[in-house]
């Protein structure tokens, strides 16, 4: 049950389609970019990693050259241009010197991305850049803009809603990025379809009918419409259902595991 699984839904499909469209865009001087934002634990990284698994698998082409269509890297913990280059270089599993000057690391990175025919660069946790000064933020964003211009590839940023503030360090950056949001779930038919999809992957012998109005309302209230919280709640409930021999998720089981409900402070596992 704890194994990572992909559950498709309409908003995720829209984002996937947009990303695939970016990946096959013809190269031009000003490539379109995307910033994907959403609440913490709401499925952004899962969606991006699924996209990389589907469209970004590396291979060797007919000319015996390595091809890495998509590079997925994580933003450095603070806004720092050298740390950004190092984070991306790590994805190539290539030797480099962290003590080298920024210019040398930049040209090494550009050479590798050209040699591996990279067509898209994704930077996860982009909101981490807010930990740096405004000047440092501008330096990192300018570095990304230059990579986009030099390589003629789209750049995708992923982060919380605060990541939008990073774009506003310079009007040029804001004009280059489209913003797509993964919103929290409303209590509607789409949420009920999501619950039905979750139920199909749970190893329970009896149907739980999670999409029924009574269970759907309670699950939505506890998870607050957050898909990560919902996933954890359902795992706990399914585990309880198996251990108790019930083999289905019932309202009493949900109530027993509502401690999974997120809090605004530190959550204690054992009281």
Image: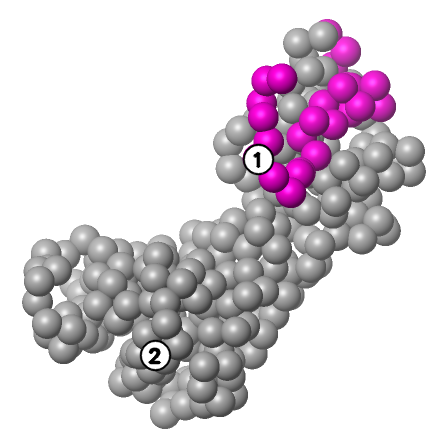
Residue nearest the viewer, comparing 69 with 131? 131
Residue 13 visible in the shown view: no
Q: Measured along the vertical axis of the image, is residue 101 above or below residue 196? A: below
Residue at the location (77% across, 11% down)? 246
Taking the image as shown, residue 77 lies to the left or right of residue 7, namely left
Taking the image as shown, residue 188 lies to the left or right of residue 57, namely right
Q: Which disc is residue 266 wearing?
A: 1
Q: Measured along the vertical axis of the image, is residue 170 above or below residue 14? A: below
Q: Where are the magenta residues, as a range?
A: 245-271
Q: Which residue, given by chain and number where applicable, does mark 2 sit on?
A: 135
Query: Image quarter for residue 224?
Result: top right
Residue nearest the viewer, comparing 250 with 79? 79
Report the predominant secondary structure element of the magenta stretch. Answer: loop
Residue at the location (91% across, 38% down)? 213
Residue 44: in magenta span: no
- Secondary-structure class at tag 2: helix
Residue 263: in magenta span: yes
Query: Image quarter for residue 184?
Result: bottom right
Which residue reaches farthest right?
213
Residue at the location (14% across, 77% down)? 103
């Amino acid at each position: 049950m704890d194994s990572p699984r992909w559950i498709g839904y309409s908003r995720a499909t829209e984002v996937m389609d947009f990303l695939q469209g970016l990946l096959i865009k013809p190269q031009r001087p000003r490539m379109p970019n995307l910033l994907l934002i959403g609440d913490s634990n709401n499925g952004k990284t899962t969606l991006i990693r699924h996209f990389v698994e589907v469209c970004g698998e590396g291979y060797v082409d007919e000319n015996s050259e390595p091809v890495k269509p998509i590079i997925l890297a994580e933003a450095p913990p603070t806004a720092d241009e050298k740390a950004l280059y190092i984070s991306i270089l790590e994805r190539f599993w290539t030797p480099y010197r962290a003590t080298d000057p920024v210019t040398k690391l930049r040209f090494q990175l550009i050479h590798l991305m050209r040699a591996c025919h990279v067509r898209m660069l994704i930077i996860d946790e982009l909101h981490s850049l807010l930990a740096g000064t405004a000047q440092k933020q501008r330096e990192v964003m300018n570095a990304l803009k230059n990579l986009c211009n030099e390589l003629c590839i789209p750049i995708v940023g992923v982060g919380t809603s605060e990541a939008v503030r990073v774009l506003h360090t310079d009007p040029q950056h804001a004009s280059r990025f489209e913003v797509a949001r993964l919103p929290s779930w409303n209590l509607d038919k789409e949420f009920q379809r999501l619950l039905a999809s979750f139920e199909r992957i749970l190893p329970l012998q009896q149907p739980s009918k999670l999409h029924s109005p009574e269970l759907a309302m309670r699950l939505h209230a506890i998870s607050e419409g957050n898909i990560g919280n919902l996933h954890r709640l359902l795992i706990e409930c399914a585990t309880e259902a198996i251990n108790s021999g019930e083999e289905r998720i019932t309202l009493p089981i949900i109530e027993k595991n509502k401690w999974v409900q997120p809090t605004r402070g530190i959550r204690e596992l054992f009281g």
